[in-house]
Every structure is written in structure tokens, then in C-alpha cells.
Amino acid sequence: NIEIILYIENTNDKPQLNDIKTQVVFQDSWLNLTPTVVDEDDDMFTFSTNFTELFEGNLSKDHFKFQNGTGDFRFKPDKKMVKKFHTYIRVEDSAGTFTREDFIIDVINVNDPPESASFNYSIEQYDPMVSFSANEGTDPDNDPITYTWNFGDDTKNQSGERLLEVEHSYQSEGTFTVNLTLSDNQGFSIQCSREISVTLPQLRGKITEMNV
């Protein structure tokens, strides 16, 4: 009888990452991604990514977190990061074999309201005419800005693009709350208010009694 002994040597298989499809995330929201790995050898894994290299290393923990032990990938983009990123996650087992999965992160813009609403005014004593001057606002999305003035005396608002300077004549004395609203063409707005005091000229004269 011939005894044959077969020695079967294990050949390490590289880990397999499940397909990572395009990840869509809105500005100022967190993208949470945990890759799924299959490995027939039950090896330990180490994960890595090139994502921070896309920012030349200038990506703070407020925007990006990555776990080398699990591959957990978290990203919170801001307005300046609205674009498509081509990146990958790489997984390596304890035997040194590795694989990687390339994918796209598509950051969607979220409209922001205009910024920097403020104004000054000029008023003379006993003059009902008040001059208002707004500081020019900005819009993060470069939308056109409409300036709307409410003078606080139940008169019609004045509104228009780049309406930075207006005049208004008050018909009564008192303290009025003036509102300036900056709005974009997406319906987002910001407002500021100031109180003004108006004093109207007094009628002065001499009454002479006449005897008939």
C-alpha cells in the first residue's frame, strides 16, 4: 500500500471591498460611510484614504473624521467645498495584500441668505425728511440682492435691487422702527432694525385780537 499525504498550503486572498457608489451629501450636513469588507482568511484590516490629500492636508476634524481600524468615513462640507471629489478607500490585511475602491463624493449646494444687513440714517431737527443709507450686503451664492425698506409709519415699502439709499418724509412726530430686509431670488432673507425719533416743525405765530 502506498500512503499519500497531501499538504494544502493556504494562499492568502486579498480582502474585497464592496462597491461604493457615488455619495451625495448636502452642504453643512454629515456624510457617514462605513465600507463593507469580505476576507476569506479572516485577517485583521487597516483602512486608509487619500481624501485629506485633496485638501493638501488642510482639512480639520470639524469637517472630516476617518477611522483606520473600521474605515468609518465622515465628511461635513461647507460652502467652499461644493464640488465633486474623486477619492478612494483602501483596505490592507495583515498579510500585506490590499484592495481599494474608488468613488465620487458629490457635494450639493444649499442656498444661504444674504449677509451683512446694516444701515445708517441722517436726520435734522424739525425736518420730516430722513435720509437712509445701507451698507452693501453680500450673498454667499452670488444671488442678486433686493433691498426692502419699511419705515415703520404704515406707509408703502420701498424695494429694489441695489436700493442702498432712500429718503422718506414722515407726516407725524414720534419714534419709529425702521426695518431693512435683504433678500435673494431664492426667498432667503436677513433683516436689521433701528429706531429713529422724528420731530416736526412747530407752527409759530401771533394772534391779534380785533375789536369790531
Image (spheres, rainbow, N blue to C red):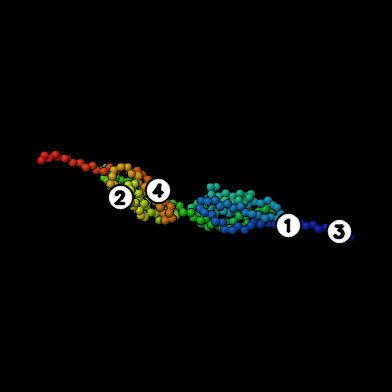
Q: Position of residue 25 (x, y in %)?
A: 54, 54
Graded by Cα atoms within 10 Å as few (under 14), some (14 to 19) or many (20 or more), the crowding at tag 2 reads some
Mark 3 vs mark 1, CA separation in Å: 25 Å
Residue most extreme to the bottom: 1
SS for callout 4? strand
Residue at 28%, 46% in the rendered image: 171
Q: CA distance from mark 2 to mark 1?
A: 85 Å
The residue wearing badge 4 is: 191
SS assignment at label 2: strand
Q: Which comes before the other along the chain, label 2 or label 3?
A: 3
> Where residue 11 is drawn, which disc sits there?
1
Write the residue at 59% across / 50% down. Answer: 66
Discs 2/3, front: 2
Instruction: Say what secondary structure mark 3 lies in.
Output: loop
Q: Is residue 57 visible?
A: no
Label annotation for residue 167: 2
Q: Nearer the viewer, residue 129 or 120?
A: 129
The quadrant of the image that shows the N terminus is: bottom right
- Amino acid carrying label 4: it is Gln
Callout 1 amino acid:
Thr
Q: As shown in the figure, which amino acid type bears the numbered disc 2?
A: Glu
User: Which of the two labelled residues, at mark 3 and mark 1, occupies the earlier sequence position?
Assistant: 3
